[in-house]
Amino acid sequence: MNEFSRLRGNERYEACDDEMPPTKHAILSASSSHRWLGCTPSARLEQEFENRETAAAAEGTAAHALAEHKLRKALKMRSKKPVSQYDCDEMDGYTDDYVAFVMEQFEQAGQNCHDPKILIEQRLDFSCYVPDGFGTGDCLIVSDRLLHIIDFKYGTGVLVEAEENPQMMLYALGALRLFDSLYDIEEVSMSIFQPRRENVSTWTISVADLMEWVETTLKPRAELAYKGEGDYIPGAWCTFCKAAVKCRARAEAKLQLAKYEFAMPPLLTDAEIEDILSRLDNLTKWSNEIMAYAQDAAINHGKQWHGFKLVESRTNRKYADEEAVIEAARAAGYTDIFKKSLIPITEMERLMGKKTFKEVLGGLVIKPQGKPTLVPASDKRPAIIIADVNQDFTEFMEE
């Protein structure tokens, strides 16, 4: 691949060959960068496992397609509305919110630049920094001094933050290759729009600091990852790794808890309890993954595990035909057979619209104070001082 360098001031930028990579799955993709940057040999190891699209992933794909369509329509571009089994009022509302956010950011960019550009589902090549590296950005807004990258996350499981998000930083590198010669870009803003978690996270980094990260972190770790070299390092990035369930390094890290021999809490030191607390959440997830893997192997591949067997799960009774039940119950003289309840707050807000909801029900909606909960120090919520809440917590427990 031909590469060339260009200079701007005292900063050096590398540019990639104009030819985009062929349509294929990138070993070092932007979406998996959190994993291969944290655990470099995992990228090659994952290639040994087949891709299986989950229902959540399929729903996310459908939401992205709908969001792209709506954004194109908002920009007066031709687009055919996609149809999927996941279409619903909720998805309609959340994708509307995404489009409104993007258009607001585009309007703001126009206030500081006479010809900002907006690109949707833009193919981005960052292979001059990451071997064969490329990805697709949901939305890019390019203007003088500022490049804004917006990523639509439809998932509910993991809260995604924009700060130091490697996927977004890689997208920024690909976008800078395309537009930094046309616009005097000094900073990059990265926004995660995750409506089902009520999360809009934005982080800004200077181009100079981004390029420093490239040299000190990205390039050396990407080189190791592409070769499948480096140490296996368990961490938060294991969550979506296809090889996680069979990773020995991860298993050894989890099984270190066995050294405590399941002693009762009062017999453990404070340091030992802190060590266990830091691992407990991931240990629970890992054990569930092991069970899911073993069960799938037994059900779908006939695997027999020593000391275990397949049985029918316990089930609850249900009506075979609700309409027939209603008719039979009424015929027997039973009419008080229905329950009514208010629709949830989020659904009510969607029904009325945010403005009307605030006018009609704003004074009737409260957010109860949460009870004290122990979480890792990295949690974004502010810490509470137990002396200030002791009395409130006592009253809560007595209710």
Image (cartoon, rainbow, N blue to C red):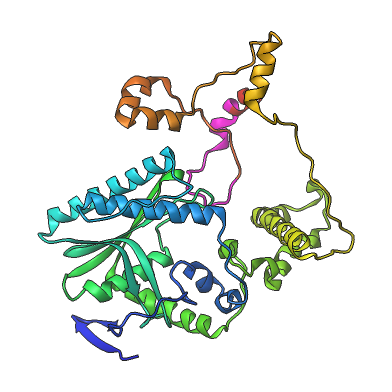
- Counting from the top left corner in percent of width and height, residue 163 is at 40, 59
Q: Can the viewer see residue 160 in this picture?
A: no
Identify the residue at horizontal 42%, vertical 43% (top origin). 91
Identify the image quadrant of residue 17: bottom left
Assess whether residue 25 is covered by the magenta stretch: no
Residue ranking furthest to the left: 114
Q: Position of residue 275 (x, y in %)?
A: 68, 57
Q: Position of residue 386 (x, y in %)?
A: 57, 36
Farthest-out residue, right: 307
Residue 163 vs residue 269: left or right? left
Q: Quadrant of residue 320?
A: top right
Nearer to me, 137 or 67: 67
Q: Residue at x 35, y 26 (%)?
A: 357
Residue at horizontal 44 percent and vertical 31 percent from the top: 347
Residue 15 in picture, x, y percent from top left: 28, 83
- For the N terminus, which image quadrant? bottom left
Seen as rendered, the residue at the extreme top is: 333
- Tell me the quarter of the image containing the C terminus: top right
Main SS, magenta residues = loop
Q: Nearer the viewer, residue 34 or 48?
A: 48
Which residue range is magenta in the image? Answer: 375-392
Residue 47 position (above or below residue 100): below
Q: Please tell me in which quadrant of the rendered image residue 253 appears.
A: bottom right
